[in-house]
Amino acid sequence: MLKAKSLRAAAVQALLSSDLDNKCRITREAAAAWRCKALSLRLPGDPPVPERPGRPERPDLVAPRLLKKRSLGSVAGRLTLMHALAHIELNAIDLALDIVARFADGDAPPSFFGNWMQVADDEARHFCLLRERMQALGADYGDFPAHDGLWQAATDTRGDLVARLAIVPLVLEARGLDVTPGLAEKLRAKGDAETAAILDIIYNDEKTHVAVGAKWFRFFCARVNIRAADRFRELVHRHFHGEIRPPFNDRARSAAGLTPLFYRTLSSSAMSR
């Protein structure tokens, strides 16, 4: 149950919850309360923003190289995929909550926080859809190992809002635009139209999330008269520890405001020429 009187406190309450049903419920209640103007942005005495979100005891967190890949032709393989996606969505909930709570003391406009609470609301819905689908197939979140690399993005950018926007929506979430349609197609080919339909929902919402990231990244760059694409590449070199790999869904990225000028020269293939 939402107890907070400010959006920042509500985001912290959801972040700290290790009960994932409760985390999703508080997130969605906080988003609705902010839309209805029932919360202040911040208040004296708000709790501090945690360095890490609350998590249940499972899943076991392992190095990415130890995660097994399985064929989508089996139920076990599809459950492994769903678990990996659910883990991404759980981290996405907390990343959206963290950007709201951590940067509430800054000078971002109120609409910034409304946009990111809508993102958090969407990610909570995605997590629940994937978890319910797993449960329908006899499994649950936590039954498979996962990795902790996604939260590194929050740690690396905790002092820089513009860097957070560059790495989370414009690198990590933009990658979903590249891979999600293909995964949905493969699931349909294997006869799993139910899971494919969930991926369709996630893909359509991801377009909006990347657009939100691109809008605010350009906004903050324009405030200080910096070219957004140049700043993006600089921040990716500084803060992103993975690879920017093709193929890219240029059409979906461009529609969201992330044109090839931002990322093409960052890809591993471009840098190897």
Image (cartoon, helix red, strand yellow):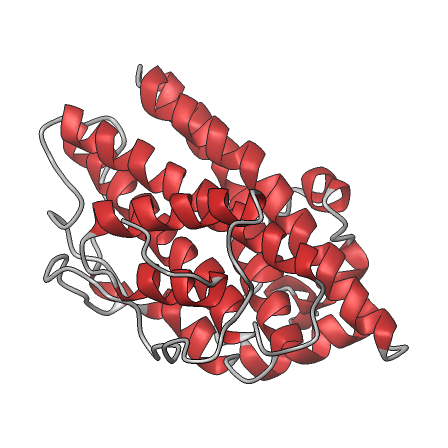
Q: Residue furthest right?
A: 225
Q: Is residue 90 above or below residue 47?
A: above
Where residue 183 sits: x, y (%)?
Answer: 43, 33
Question: What residue do we see at 81% from left, 69% from top?
Answer: 228
Left or right of 212 on screen, residue 29:
left
Residue for point 43% across, 50% down: 30
Residue 66, horizontal then vertical, whole percent: 20, 63
Figure quadrant of residue 49: bottom left
Q: Is residue 125 left or right of residue 102?
A: left
How many numbered badges does the structure rendering display? 0
Residue 265: tell me if it is visible.
Answer: yes
Q: Is residue 204 left or right of residue 125?
A: right
What residue lies at 60% left-to-right and 47% top-to-bottom?
Answer: 209
Say which of 124 and 192 sits in front.
124
Quadrant housing the C terminus: bottom right
Q: Can residue 186 be seen here?
A: no
